[in-house]
Amino acid sequence: MTEGVFLEPAVQNEITELLQAWGAGDAAALERLTPAVYQELRRIARRSMRGENPENSLQPTALVHEAWLRLADARVTGWQDRAHFFAVCARLMRRILVDAARARQSGKRGGREVRVELHESIHGAPLQDREMVRLDDALEALARFDARKAQVVELRFFGGLEVAETAVALNVSEQTVLRDWRLARAWLARELDKPPAD
């Protein structure tokens, strides 16, 4: 089995079938789904946390468990396939990380401008809490007028997916992902250069 969302076809089909059964109300399907997706979720969590502040006490395993609890409570009924599932998981992990950053930031005041840079990879310097919150706000603004570009950033930056994995998850070409990534980064850079609205 290869790493990432590129799983063997039989495993991909099994995951899709289990997701659809779970969405249709089969509780036993969720129990069978857990071991099939757990390692992939841990990989996404590790990649998501590469950009995190080292002072963050949340660990990848805890992030997976929190995302799994939120996912189980969400009761999504329209699972398309395993790529849709992993995209939703990446979004949940983003929300958890941003919520944690907001919680740590609450009560902390300061009018200093914060600069956020989106590097080609997520292996750059960790984001501080204020940077994470500003990036999330800018990403929400981007999603209001171009949801796919926001999804590309979410999957690549927060989910840690490579270009090919992102293309599979969004059902678009790799060239589309590269173009969206480039344009979204330029738009976000311009948005993040604006003074904070404190």
Image (cartoon, grey):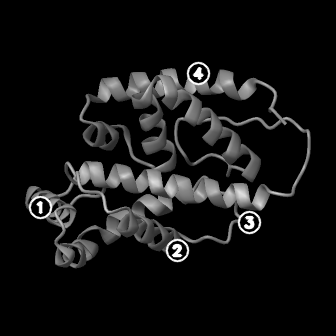
Q: CA distance from mark 1 to mark 4?
A: 38 Å
Note whether 24 is above or below 84 in the view shown. Answer: below
Callout 4 amino acid: Trp
Residue found at x 25% / y 41%: 168
On the image, numbered disc 2 is attached to which residue? 62
Lateral position of residue 121 relative to residue 52, left or right? left
Mark 1 or mark 4: whose residue is earlier in sequence: 1
Callout 1 amino acid: Glu
Note whether 86 is above or below 194 in the view shown. Answer: below
Q: CA distance from mark 2 to mark 4?
A: 32 Å
Q: Nearer the viewer, mark 1 or mark 3?
A: 1
* Quarter of the image with the C terminus in it: top right
Disc 1 to disc 3: CB gap under 8 Å: no
Note whether 78 is above or below 24 in the view shown. Answer: above
On the image, numbered disc 3 is attached to which residue? 55
Lateral position of residue 87 relative to residue 56, left or right? left
Q: Nearer the viewer, mark 1 or mark 4?
A: 1
Lateral position of residue 83 relative to residue 146, left or right? left
Residue found at x 36% / y 49%: 87
Mark 1 or mark 3: whose residue is earlier in sequence: 1
Q: CA distance from mark 2 to mark 1?
A: 27 Å
Q: Percent from the top left, x then y, of residue 53?
A: 69, 58
On the image, numbered disc 4 is attached to which residue? 187
Could you classify mark 4 by the number of other residues whose Cα lies within 10 Å: few (under 14), some (14-19), or many (20 or more)? some
Residue found at x 70% / y 29%: 192
Quadrant for residue 170, please give it.
top left
Callout 2 amino acid: Ala
Disc sitting over residue 17 in the figure:
1
